[in-house]
Image (tube, grey):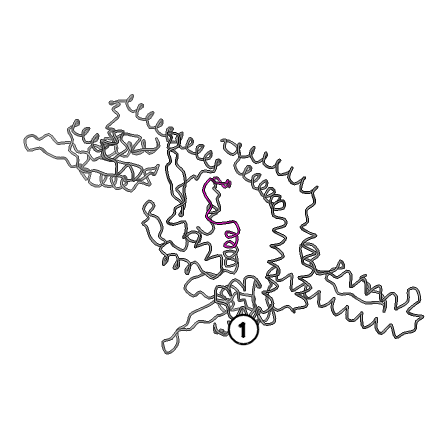
Amino acid sequence: MSKKTTQTSTTDKPVKTAVLYLRVSSKRQMDTAADIDPEGNSIDTQRKICREKARQMGVVILEEYVEPGNSAQTIAKRPVFQDMMKRIKQERDVDHVIIYQRSRAFRNYIDAGNTKQELEKIGVNLVSAKEDFGKGLNAEVMEAMTDVFNWWTVRQSGEDIKLKMANKVRNGGTPSRAKVGYLNVGKNIDGRKINTIEVDSERSRFIVMAFELFATGEESLTSLQAKLTTAGFRMPKWGKSTSGIVSEEKLRNLLRDRYYLGFVHLDGIEYQGNHTPLVTPELFDRVQRVLVVRGENKVRHREHNHYLKGLLWCARCKNRLIVQRAQGRHGGEYYYFFCRGRQLKICDLPFIPLEALEDAVERYYGHAVSLPADFRADIATGLEAATTAAMGLSDEMRDKLTKRLATLDKKESYFLDLAAEEGWPKGQLRAKLETLRAERSEITNTLDTSTQRLDQGQRIFRDVLALLEEPAALYKRSGEHVRVILNGVFFGRLYVDGQKITDHDSREPFGALVEAYRVWVEHKDEHERRSYQRRAGNVRTSKSAASPGGYGTDLQSSTSRSTASYEVRGWSKTVMVEPRGFEPLTFCLPDRCSTS
């Protein structure tokens, strides 16, 4: 295609043409007037200077291309620039591309050089309105040096910002735009403007509401989103996004964000922030447990959601059961579970109506999640002595831990100083800080909350035991979301055969309780058997009862040792069994145990 030219009415001399390329990197600069910003950081300023340059050159401006608020550092990510280049190549009616300044158009010397060569191939000249290097080899060298210097300036500025940001985070500042529930504000302190973070009085209450509702275990992300929206929660307008309803994905990320606990992060390292926390550690941990339970059980709130989804497994082939929707002959629809093994052609488990398995799980709670009252009473009795002995803290130990804390504080300050400097291996420093902070957290919890944890642990355990008084009744009267939590507490998997639950994998600590109950029953049966044998021995002659090493004396001492050795304790130490372990006692003689 031949290059087009524009003719005047009085001469045959063609008129040269040009297009303007104007660019700013932020929305604020788009809205700034030329008389307010004479430094070229607004579109109005650049337009004025570029039009004046076109007038001086005597060229006609065909079109103007404006890149609005696009901070991309490469021309490949600038759509307006790409549209301009496409038009120039297709129409071939442009002689010059006028830009305000090379640093405005190009952020690196590679883009500048490639664009110059690309335009020269089709006879188009690149003109900078603010920079006139003339023509010839020296001019091209000056252009190239300017592009390299501009690239260096951008990189140097980036490194400087990175260092300042690291120092800001280290001092507790927020490195990014304020999270939802907070606001970026500027304060005048001693004549200096300080940018900081404040709690958003309008939206912060909805953040707290989200955590508190989800911590109950009765809300899904879908229902939580609906309740927040109904209550009036709307996301702020940021960038290209518009103010509107919070998405489930953003809600999920919000519930996992430790920023609301008062922490800030940079390069994977966590620092204590200066902003006001919106939630307590206890509330945050409860929310994380609910998220973990649902994540482990693969409960996905999608089209065919059901509270048993992810919990049921085939007893025959050990594959997961999948929920599916079917269309009835007369237009209705119904749901059923089927084994994944059927799809793989390795299982013959029939299709099971959804309601049948709901009833089966309810029935299973009646015997699988049931512990007798006398066992629970023994557990509660042994719990207090075991936890008190395990969590007691002597004065000597407290003094040692306090000194260790002071040492750890000094080490943390040293590592944080290194992290703020360039050149140190961030990965290794991060690992050392995480190890150090984990140790300090453990020591602090031991020092400050040993009594509180003791009381809380005993109270929680008693609550669990109370929960086991009538688990089947509780499960039956609970809603779907509470059932999800209960299933997650007691079971890892439920195995299905036909329309029955045949077995299960227990979750801890419930699994430990079940195992302790088995041992408890064995001890109880053994104790009763020994008591019977002792009573039977008393009927024998006084000689056998009084003789050294005789039946009566040895049995009585053996029985006394067995009874004294059995205590119900927490599983962190003795796993609620006697010192000889889980194996039942094996008799080889009428008066002694082979495992004694």
The stretch in magenta equals 266-288
Is residue 555 in the magenta section? no
Instruction: Place residue 468 in its image quadrant.
Output: bottom right
Residue 516 coordinates in the image, percent (x, y): 68, 63
Q: Which residue lies furthest to the left in this view?
A: 10
Residue 398, above or below 481: above
Which quadrant: the N terminus?
A: top left
Note whether 93 is above or below 180 in the view shown.
above
**Mark 1 residue crowding within 10 angstroms, few (<14) / some (14–19) / many (20+):** some
Residue 252 lies left or right of residue 123; in this view the side is right
Is 418 placed left or right of 37 in the picture? right
Residue under label 1, please give it.
Answer: 360
Under circle 1, the secondary element is helix
Screen quadrant of the C terminus? bottom right
Task: Estimate the x, y position of residue 557 in percent, counting from the top left.
Answer: 84, 63
One can see residue 467 in this view: yes
In the rendered structure, which amino acid carries the disc numbered 1? Answer: Ala
